[in-house]
Amino acid sequence: MLLVDLDNTLIDRDAAFREAAAAFLAAHGLPAGDLSWLMGVDAGGYTPRDLVGTAMVNRYGVSGATVRALLDTGAADRVTLAPATADALATVRATGWTCVIVTNGRTAQQETKIRNTGLDRLVDGWIVSEAAGHKKPAPEIFHAAAAVAGLPLRDAWVIGDSPHADIAGAAACGLPSVWISAGRPWTAPGHRPTHIAHDAAGALNRLTVRP
């Protein structure tokens, strides 16, 4: 069984948010140079949405509803699935792996991304932290994902881009993992991934041997 992260693993969530944020700034006549500030505040989606919203309202004086529209649908409406990732998912499932998406976030937003990209037809299920009541790296969300698949957690691999949420979560459950580096060096202390791959397709292609 593969427990695979969604944002910045299967899909390039940051690129989608960057595009949405740039469109927001342009639509409201705000400085294009603020894109770096906005991406920093967003922190790859890890900053709580209410804190991002408050920071934007305070900085720009725009309505809360306008900001919420960006945060709720901006990235979700723009995410795409790379063909290489789609092909790799099809291949690993054909070789016997069950694939479950394990993602932190709000259920409506994350399920919109999954369906808009066609991932709902390429995986065997998913679990979202809001619905699970636990966030990665908590072991409970990985157990919930295994329950979705109806398989024992001990047979799982974890694939993800976050040293904290994904790789530390896998280590806490005693599971092997593949870290999506996107060219970054591994610097987290205390634990290491089993393998490192540049992107999701590379990670999935390492595991194409039938388990």
Image: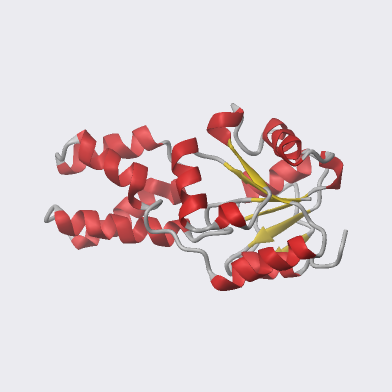
Is residue 204 something one can see in this rendering?
Answer: yes
Q: Quadrant of the C terminus?
A: bottom right
Q: Is residue 203 visible?
A: no
Please report the residue visible at 30 percent of the width from the left and 53 percent of the height from the top.
Answer: 37
Q: In the depicted view, which residue is nearer to us: 90 or 180?
A: 90
Q: Residue at x 28, y 42 (%)?
A: 69
Residue that protrudes farthest toward the front in the picture:
121
Q: Residue furthest left?
A: 29
Judge from the rendering whether residue 152 lies leftward or rightward of residue 120; answer left or right: right
x and y percentages locating residue 100 in the rendered image: 68, 48
Q: How is the image coloured?
A: secondary structure
Left or right side of 49 for 174: right
Q: Residue at x 65, y 45 (%)?
A: 125
- Name the residue located 60 percent from the left edge and 66 percent from the top edge: 86
**In the rendered view, does 208 fall on the left or right side of 5?**
right
Q: Nearer the viewer, residue 104 or 36?
A: 104
Instruction: Give x and y (percent) for residue 81.
Output: 51, 64
Q: Nearer the viewer, residue 59 or 206?
A: 206
Q: How many marks?
A: 0
Position in image of residue 192 (x %, y %): 75, 54
> Vertical placement of 190 versus 53: above or below?
below
Of residues 115 and 140, which is closer to you in this image?
Answer: 115
Name the residue furthest top.
Answer: 133
Relative side of 112 to 69, left or right: right
Q: Position of residue 48 (x, y in %)?
A: 42, 36
